[in-house]
Image (tube, grey):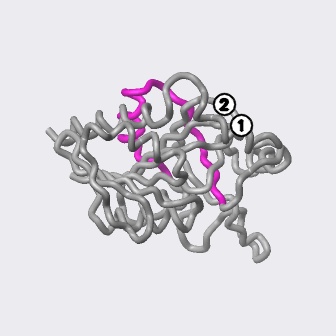
Amino acid sequence: MKIGIVVADYDEYAPFLEEIKQYSPQEYKYFNRLAVGFNCGGVDVICINCGIGKVNAATAATHLADMGCTYILNYGLSGGISRVHRGEVVLPDKFLEHDFDLTGIGYKPCEKPSQKYIYEADNKLLQKAEAVIGKCVGGTAVCGDRFVCSADDRDFLRDTFDGTTCDMETAAIASVCDMANIPFLSIRRVSDDAGEDAYANYSDMNTLEGQTLSQVFMKVLFALCCKEGQ
């Protein structure tokens, strides 16, 4: 039993390191990226701070798949597209790459020729997460190598893809997990409304009172490890 975790931004990764000090984490070598390994409830866990963007995320996920991870998890901040509010924890159940575009040769937006292009979170992992943190909004996470900070762009993602949240990594990780047949779960917190003030709101999200995203994520991870490690 082994759990892999992919985290993009160092500001999202650093609080997690504080949360896992009790498990005596050891530095894990993964190229020039920050990574740690530790044991929680008898389960080996590897967490990679991969860097922002789809290529970084997919590379880290592929490495974790090659390491034989049973599950791959992700957490991070997302822009809110529809049906969500700033500060809310979201459990996306679908993922797609909004910036994959072959419409010029007759395909639908984000459609990949002869392959799956809308990926899904693992239902059992979603149920386990909700058992720990309560019922959350699901919906579609639209992913692309672009920080969305325009109301026009946000509305396009809502109207074209029925997007709930937007980010820069989840669909890339989900794609690797789908190909490797590894259950995937992403836990996201809404930092902004993906409008013109998105960057300012994203930057100060971690100063808000209440549970940080890393604390919420640790509750889910601990529950998975304790059950699976028995």
Q: Secondary structure at mark 2?
A: loop
Residue at (50, 31) in percent of width and height: 212
Q: Which mark is residue 3?
A: none
Which contiguous range is marked in magenta?
A: 120-144
Left or right side of 218 for 80 = right
**The quarter of the displayed image where residue 218 is located:** top left
Q: Marks 1 and 2: which is nearer the front?
A: 1
Name the residue tied to disc 1: 201
Residue at (33, 54) in percent of width and height: 36
Q: Which is nearer the eye, 191 or 144?
A: 191
Mark 1, other Cα within 10 Å: few <14 / some 14–19 / many ≥20: some
> Residue 17, position in %: x, y?
39, 44
Left or right side of 161 for 118 = left
Name the residue tied to disc 2: 86
Q: Secondary structure at mark 1?
A: helix
User: Disc 1 marks which amino acid?
Assistant: Asn
> Residue 118, position in %: x, y?
57, 57
Which residue is the extreme one toward the right? Answer: 152
Residue at (59, 61) in percent of width and height: 53
